[in-house]
Structure formats: structure tokens, C-alpha cells
RNA sequence: GCCGCGUUCGUCUAGGGGUCUAGGACGCCGGCCUCUCACGCCGGUAACACGGGUUCAAAUCCCGUACGCGGUACCA
């Protein structure tokens, strides 16, 4: 047993993103591997961006991926509540402490005041002026106003925020578990708003307060947070708390190296929401496996893992620090690998469900035989429906390229002869079908391929599929003969 | 602009001073097996961003440059 406590802390401003799932996964893996706790905390401090069903989507996506949450808004826990909107008192209390100790101050500047300041100070060398140690002296805050004025404004209920007072001239250094030592000069850290004028805390305050009170030992999050970490470190210090271990994960980039923004990704045909992968029929375990390897490696040449395997192989110090590009082809490969490891009877059940949903009328025994033939050559479970049509219905068309390439002058006659032979011999095994076919080609002194190709085309309508004789054996002599006669008549 | 983080095959990566004429995986190409094939097997293609240093020796350490990404909100 260890005391490792990690959290995944999404904000319910949208559905769970693929990058979010990876962050959750790394947290989960560390928790499981160390016997620690995996906590879900909903960071809903931005009321303007709140999306009603986002939390449900996040929960659903984590459950689909198999990441069981130990503590969270839906399962409870000892250090709840697990939604920040329900913890306001805590933030207010610590904000007051910070004011009292002088680590934070009140600021009364309106959004217009801020715009004016930025407009005034903006220059080519400094396109985005900050509210910081250099500028706060010119603003309306408890540092520039007299105590009486401040009290008056406060008493009058004047809208205001609370800002962190960042002292210049220090270097803030911390050790990141994936990047080693990182340091920032405090002069370039702005006086971050801690409490908004609506009374809600910003991420920065809430995150630090909650991580402390929830006993979080490792903060594992995306690299987009690296730049704000000095503010968090300063907050921990000001509050007299120890900071947890920080670990900033490399960002997931689009297949072309740019940002994996929703727009860019859609343009490139790559889904960004976990839900989309689920709907597209990906194996959850394959997505998890792929995501785990996107930025981390086990240090040996293993690649295919189930969740349990990942738990034991994972380690934070084998997480890379460079951004990684998302590759759908590799995901597809992982999907195929995981599909092959599913027990045949389980996959058969799934195939049955998929086929039924697609309106195919069939039975379990027959589907089991189809699955046996298809399992090791598909990359998506859905292929069990989309690539198996001829197992359930006679082909209504024949692949034109296949006709051109494989259907010769003597094909109709050969195929008819095979149909006759099948009806006479009533073969059962794949071998029986093969013997019957070779009898014909041998006695006519033509290559087996002369008949094999037209038979596949006539029976399935396409030029590829599982082993021909295995396929015929599943279909049975009656169906085969019927289809062959029809093909002969249709194609001449 | 400034700050931070990065940079090994197209992609994910191993490697962290000599064992590197740089290994694996996906993709791609070729072959095998075969009657076909989306499986499998074998083989091939392909990379240390650039420039300086340190060292007997650098993909590996240091500095600089370039490029990429992130941050620079009363968003997270």
C-alpha cells in the first residue's frame, strides 16, 4: 500500500478529448501500480463555459476506457465534495488568508481598465502587457489605494478580484518528473487572478487548494500547464504547504505536427473526442494501449498491452517530453491486435449483436463459423458486418475489376461443372471442396487458379476474403451451387 | 515580442560519452506461403535539425542558431 494520490481534473466545458483520456490514463496507471488512489475532480469554476452533459460524458468515457475512479463526484470519498463549485467556502477562506498575509491583494480594475492599460502599454516589443509587479502600481488595487478607500469600496460591494502578489527578483524552480529541473524568473510571472469578480476562484487557486486538501501527491497534467506552474508553486509557499510532485506530459499533436485542435483534426479526418472513437467501434483497450504508448514506452520492445499490463509496466520517468503526433494507422493496427486476442465466443456474441443491429437475420452457430474465419484478418469489429455480407446474402453484383481480371471465356462452364460436382458430392469439409475443385481442373488439364478465382468471384462477388475452401464450407453446397449458376448466367 | 519546453527514420520510439556501419514498431515497398487475402513470416526503404566547443572519442555533455509546440485571459 502506498500513499500515492493522483487526480484527473477536467473542466466540464466539453466532451472528453483524446488528450484528456491520456492524461487520465497516466494518472490511473500510476495510482494502480502503486496501490494509490485515482481521484476525479470536476473543475467547474467557469460558469460561462459550463456544458450541461459534459460531466456525464467524461464519466462515460472513463468507464468505457476501463479507468475506474476511486473517489469522485459520482462515487464519493473522504475528501469531497469533488466538484469545485461545491467547495467555494474553502477557496474563500484561503483567499482571505492570502490577503491577510500580504501574498495577495484586492484589485478593483474593470475589464475596461485592463483593456486601457494593455492598449497604453502595448508595443511591438511587448504585445501583451501583463498585470504584474511593473504595472500594478498604476492600477486601482489595495496596493495603490489607501486602506480607507479599499475598505469603502469593499463595503460598497464594488466588483473586484483578488490577485496573487508576485514578488520580483526571485527564481522559482521545481523538479518536474518528466522534465527535471524547470525554472522561471518571478519577474515574468503575472499577478494572477485568484478569485474572479463573481466570487469564483480561478483554476490556479482552486487547483492548489484542492490538491492540498485532497492529499494529492502527484500532479500529472498536460504541458499547457507548465507555464502556470510557478504561480502554483508560489501559492503553495504562500499558504505554507508542500507542493506535490509535478509531471507535465507532452502534448498530442495532429498527424501533421500542428495543434490537435478540434477544427484542424476534423479537417484531417481524425476524431478528437473519446466518444467518437467509441461510436466508431474502436476497442477501448486498443485506444488505451495506443494512447499509453503515445509519449511513454516500457523500455523494452513490448507494444501490445492490456490495462493490467500497462499498470505494471508504467513509470513516469519513461514518459517523453517532446510533443507527439497522432497516427490513425497505428491505432488501427493496435485495434487489430486487440481484436485478435478476444476469445472467439466473446467476439461471436459481439458479431451477433452488430449483425442484428444491421438487420441481418442469422444464428449464433453460423456466426461463430464466420468469426472463426474473419477474426485474424480484420482491424475493426465493424468489419465483421461490413466485410461479411456474402456470408448472409447472395452477391447482387460482382467486382468489375475482378471480372476483368479473373472471369475468362471458359469460366462459366468451369463454374457450372463445379456446381454440379458440389451438388453430387455434397462436400462438408474445406478439404472436400478442394478435392472436388481440383478433380475438375486436373481432368481438364487447366491450372487450379482458372477455376478458383471465378469461384470466389461468383460466390462472394469480390476477389478477397478468407481462405476460399473454408469459406465455401461455411456456405454449404446448396448455396455455393446456386450462386455459381447465377454468376455463370450473369457473367457468361 | 517575452517566458518556458522541445528537436533520433514519414510517424511512435530505444539509446544518455566508446558495444551505433544507430535497434524496435506503424506505414510504405519487395518476397515467401498460397487459389485469393485485410493474417502470418522474411527482407528492404528511411533518422541523430544546424553551427561551434569539451574530449583520445559525442546521437549522447556545454554554448549558440534555426525550427516546432505551449503560455502570455476575471478559460481551463
Image (cartoon, rainbow, N blue to C red):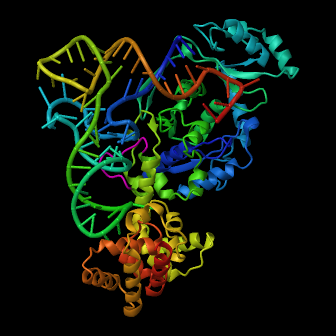
Residue under the point 56% across and 53% down: A277
Q: Nearer the viewer, residue A17 or A280?
A: A280
Residue under the point 74% across and 33% down: A200
Residue under the point 61% across and 37% down: A263
**Is residue A59 one of those drawn in magenta?**
no
Residue under the point 74% across and 17% down: A107
Span colored in magenta: A294-304
In the rendering, at what x and y percent does residue A116 appear? 75, 11
Q: Residue furthest bottom?
A: A424
Q: Is residue A344 left or right of residue A280?
A: left
Tell me which corner region of the image, top left, top right, bottom left or bottom right, holds residue A228. top right
Report the number of discs. 0
**Is residue A298 one of those drawn in magenta?**
yes
Image vertical order of residue A328 relative to residue A305, above or below: above
Image vertical order of residue B72 relative to residue A458, above or below: above
In the rendering, at what x and y percent does residue B39 appear? 35, 62
Image vertical order of residue A463 relative to residue A333, above or below: below
Per the picture, the main secondary structure of the magenta-coloured stretch is loop
Q: Nearer the viewer, residue A376 or A400?
A: A400
In the rendering, at what x and y percent does residue A398 appear? 49, 68
One can see residue A68 in this view: no
Image vertical order of residue A247 relative to residue A113, above or below: below
One can see residue A95 in this view: yes
In the rendering, at what x and y percent does residue A415 appear? 39, 79
Tell me which corner region of the image, top left, top right, bottom left or bottom right, holds residue A475. bottom left
Q: Nearer the viewer, residue A262 or A43?
A: A262
Q: Residue furthest right?
A: A156
Q: Is residue A181 left or right of residue A77?
A: left
Tell me which corner region of the image, top left, top right, bottom left or bottom right, holds residue A396. bottom right
Amino acid at each position: 500500500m502506498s500513499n500515492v494520490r493522483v487526480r484527473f481534473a477536467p473542466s466540464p466545458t466539453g466532451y472528453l478529448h483524446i488528450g484528456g483520456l491520456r492524461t487520465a490514463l497516466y494518472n490511473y496507471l500510476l495510482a494502480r501500480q502503486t496501490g494509490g488512489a485515482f481521484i476525479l475532480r470536476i473543475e467547474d469554476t467557469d460558469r460561462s463555459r459550463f456544458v450541461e452533459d459534459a460531466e456525464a460524458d467524461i464519466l462515460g468515457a472513463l468507464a468505457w476506457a476501463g479507468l475506474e475512479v476511486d473517489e469522485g463526484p459520482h462515487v464519493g470519498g473522504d475528501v469531497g465534495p469533488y466538484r469545485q463549485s461545491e467547495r467555494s467556502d474553502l477557496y474563500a477562506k484561503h483567499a482571505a488568508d492570502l490577503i491577510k498575509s500580504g501574498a495577495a491583494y484586492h484589485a478593483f480594475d474593470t475589464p475596461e481598465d485592463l483593456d486601457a492599460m494593455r492598449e497604453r502599454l502595448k508595443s511591438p516589443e511587448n504585445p501583451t502587457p501583463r498585470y504584474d509587479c511593473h504595472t500594478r502600481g498604476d492600477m486601482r488595487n489595495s496596493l495603490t489605494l489607501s486602506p480607507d478607500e479599499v475598505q469603502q469600496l469593499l463595503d460598497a460591494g464594488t466588483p473586484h478580484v483578488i490577485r496573487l502578489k508576485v514578488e520580483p527578483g526571485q527564481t522559482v524552480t521545481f523538479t518536474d518528473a518528466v522534465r527535471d529541473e524547470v525554472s522561471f524568473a518571478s519577474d515574468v510571472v503575472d499577478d494572477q487572478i485568484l478569485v474572479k469578480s463573481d466570487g469564483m476562484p480561478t483554476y490556479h487557486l482552486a487547483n492548489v487548494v484542492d490538491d492540498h486538501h485532497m492529499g494529492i501527491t502527484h500532479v500529472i497534467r498536460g504541458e499547457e500547464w507548465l507555464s502556470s506552474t510557478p504561480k502554483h508553486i508560489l501559492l503553495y509557499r504562500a499558504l505554507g504547504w508542500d507542493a506535490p510532485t509535478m509531471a507535465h506530459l507532452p502534448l498530442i499533436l495532429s498527424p501533421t505536427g500542428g495543434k490537435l485542435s478540434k477544427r484542424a483534426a476534423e479537417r484531417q479526418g481524425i476524431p478528437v473526442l473519446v466518444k467518437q472513437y467509441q461510436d466508431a467501434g474502436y476497442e477501448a483497450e486498443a485506444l488505451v494501449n495506443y494512447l499509453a504508448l503515445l509519449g511513454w514506452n516500457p523500455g523494452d520492445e513490448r507494444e501490445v498491452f492490456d490495462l493490467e499490463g500497462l499498470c505494471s509496466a508504467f513509470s513516469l520517468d519513461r514518459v517523453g517530453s517532446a510533443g507527439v503526433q497522432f497516427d490513425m494507422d497505428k491505432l488501427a493496427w493496435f485495434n487489430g491486435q486487440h481484436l485478435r486476442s478476444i476469445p472467439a465466443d466473446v467476439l461471436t456474441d459481439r458479431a451477433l449483436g452488430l449483425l442484428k443491429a444491421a438487420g441481418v437475420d442469422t444464428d449464433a452457430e453460423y456466426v461463430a463459423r464466420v468469426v472463426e474465419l474473419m477474426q485474424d484478418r480484420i482491424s475493426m469489429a465493424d468489419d465483421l458486418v461490413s466485410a461479411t455480407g456474402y456470408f448472409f446474402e447472395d452477391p447482387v453484383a460482382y467486382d468489375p475489376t475482378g471480372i476483368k481480371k479473373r472471369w475468362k471465356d471458359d469460366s462459366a462452364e468451369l463454374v457450372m461443372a463445379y456446381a454440379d460436382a458440389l451438388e453430387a458430392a455434397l462436400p462438408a469439409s474445406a478439404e472436400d471442396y478442394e478435392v472436388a475443385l481440383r478433380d475438375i481442373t486436373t481432368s481438364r488439364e487447366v491450372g487450379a487458379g482458372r477455376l478458383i478465382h471465378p469461384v470466389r468471384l461468383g460466390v462472394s462477388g469480390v476477389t478477397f476474403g478468407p481462405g476460399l475452401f473454408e469459406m465455401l464450407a461455411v456456405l454449404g453446397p446448396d448455396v455455393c451451387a446456386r450462386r455459381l449458376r447465377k454468376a455463370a448466367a450473369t457473367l457468361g
